[in-house]
Image (spheres, rainbow, N blue to C red):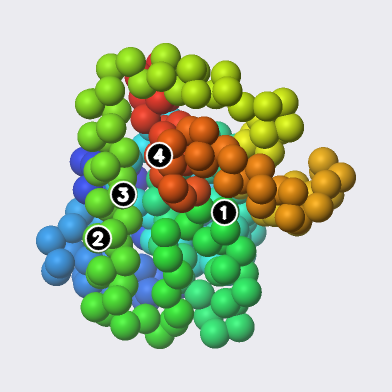
Amino acid sequence: MKLHDNGNTVFVVDDDAAVCDALGMLLRTAGMEVETFRSAASFLKELRPGQTGCLVLDIRMPGMSGLDLQDELHRRKIYIPIVFLTGHGDVPMAVRALKKGAVDFIEKPHEAERLVLAVLNALRMDDERRKQTNRHGDLSLDLATRLATLSEREREVLNRILEGKQTRQITDELCISVKTVEFHRARIRDKLGVATQAQLFILFIASEGEA
């Protein structure tokens, strides 16, 4: 299956065929373009750089899990908005995914209205990212100017944030406290002119689009 170029496409990745079919029907009924995949590997096989749209992703799957796929997308610097599907016992994992930049998580069995709203929000985020790319012809230069204001330690923290690493991982790698990491996170957001981690990712995606 080839991925659509339509920026409004929702990509559903779940190993359960019944879930894929049900979600596909629900989201198509809501007027969305939907493509379904039964594994993270099959999605990655068709993925291209700069993919747009959003991803509805099961957090637990055989082989590559939803969290593993999120990490792989970060490694490839593809920050497509993600809505995670979780079981009741997976909530701690979902919270971890949110800290890495996921838009939302929905517990199974999902409430149709809440899922549709979460997906619409994810698509709006992706649309805003593309509008920023079109609006700021000199975004890369502007970002470079702001990056130049970061200290060496702030750059180290920023690089790890963009890799999708959690605060605890950053503290271990840099041998600094959680409080210090959070301080650097706040300074980075302030210097780069963003309020949230999601906006931070959008800033870098838009910059790459202009590169």
Q: Are marks 1 and 3 in contact (CB under 8 Å)?
A: no
Residue at screen point 74% across, 49% down: 180
Front residue of this view, candidates 23 and 8: 8
Tell me the SS state at disc 2.
helix
Mark 1 is on which residue type? Lys
* Mark 3 crowd level (few <14, some 14–19, many ≥20, 10 Å Cα): many
Q: How many labels does the image show?
A: 4
The tag earlier along the polypeptide, 1 or 3, is 1
The tag earlier along the polypeptide, 2 or 4, is 2
Front residue of this view, candidates 190 and 52: 190
Q: Mark 1 points at which residue?
A: 100
Residue 202 — which label?
Answer: 4
Q: Is residue 46 visible?
A: no
Residue 60 position in % (x across, y down): 58, 69
Image quadrant where residue 152 sits: top right
Front residue of this view, candidates 196 and 132: 196
- Give above or below for 135 relative to 125: above
Instruction: Measure the C-alpha gap from mark 2 to mark 4.
Output: 17 Å
Residue at screen point 53% across, 61% down: 98
Q: Do the residues labelled 3 and 4 touch (CB within 8 Å)?
A: yes
Q: Which of marks 2 and 4 is in front?
A: 4
